[in-house]
Amino acid sequence: MKYSFIDLEKLKGSQIACITLDLEQDHGGLLKEPSHEAFLLADDLINYFKEKSIPLTCFVQGSLFETHPEIVEDFSSQLNIEFELHTYSHPELREINHKYEIKNGKNAFYNFFGNYPKGYRSQAGIFNQELFSSLSYDGFKFDSSIIPSLRPGFYNGLNLPSIPHRLSDFNLNEFPITTFSKLLRIPVSLSYLKLLGKPYTALLNISKLPNFVNFSFHLHDLKNLNSSKKIQFDKISPIYGPILKRTYKNDKGMEILDKFINILLKRNYNFLKLEDFYNMLILK
């Protein structure tokens, strides 16, 4: 895949952080039947971001515009927030059809807002040529699907840049999920902070972070839910079952999120929505 680096020097050394939420059904496609228990945590999260005066980029599962429009309305009415698209149905990974997810998600988004999304995020770091070709064809301006790390059976982004870049063949800007560094490709996301615990949080606290941070999380990362007990672990690789159990057993997601955001605040990061970051790059 051909890419070119985006000239971040145009930002004049600014430290920028984009906090991104994947608003989706509980645990993506890991449950036999969709559950939305995590939506009960939305009010607390909204109040937290209002108190911090921090903007939020929200990648919405497209079907929620049709089945649960009230959750989108709750966020849109009370926050400095940007909405983009996060697939349509959030299917099981082996069944994902990028063209279907993009087309139907884009239509659901338009029917709700009256305009089309500029940005997209696939699920679980799954990307391929079909994804980027479809996004380019449908007029998307940026993508944030790539996790420049390694998760066997899901994705391998180790050969891709860990900083924003341009996918040359698709006329598309890619804003990957941030990793700790170019060499230590551990994602900077709430799920990994929960999984790796205090040592990883402490490492982030004392180490220099990239000048651009794209941090991701889900509502179901914030608290241990009853729906967590319904994950179909028998359909998950034996490698990942214990990892998921450890991650979702951790009930301090909101506290960990707050600690990380305070690290960024202490270091004077400028918080932006991803669309604002995109506009800053193309207007410079």
Image (cartoon, rainbow, N blue to C red):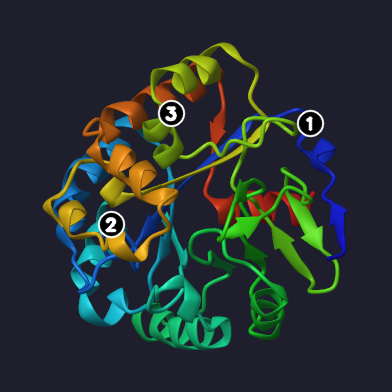
Residue placed at 19% from the left, 64% from the top?
36
The reply to whether the C-beta atoms of the residues labelled 3 and 1 are less than 8 Å apart is no
Instruction: Residue type at mark 1: give it.
Output: Lys
Question: Pointer 2: what residue?
Answer: 75
Residue 80 visible in the snapshot: no
Residue 44 placement: quadrant: top left
**Secondary structure under badge 2?**
helix
Distance between mark 2 and mark 3 Cα atoms: 29 Å
> Is label 2 or label 3 in front?
3
x, y percentage for residue 51? 28, 32
- How many other residues sit within 10 Å of disc 1, few (<14), some (14-19) or many (≥20)? few
Distance between mark 3 and mark 1 Cα atoms: 33 Å
**Secondary structure under badge 1?**
loop
Residue placed at 31% from the left, 37% from the top?
246
x, y percentage for residue 21? 40, 52
The reply to whether the C-beta atoms of the residues labelled 2 and 3 are less than 8 Å apart is no
Residue 4 visible in the snapshot: yes
Question: Pointer 1: what residue?
Answer: 12
x, y percentage for residue 276? 59, 52
Question: Pointer 3: what residue?
Answer: 196
Could you say which is closer to the camera, residue 250 or residue 73? 250
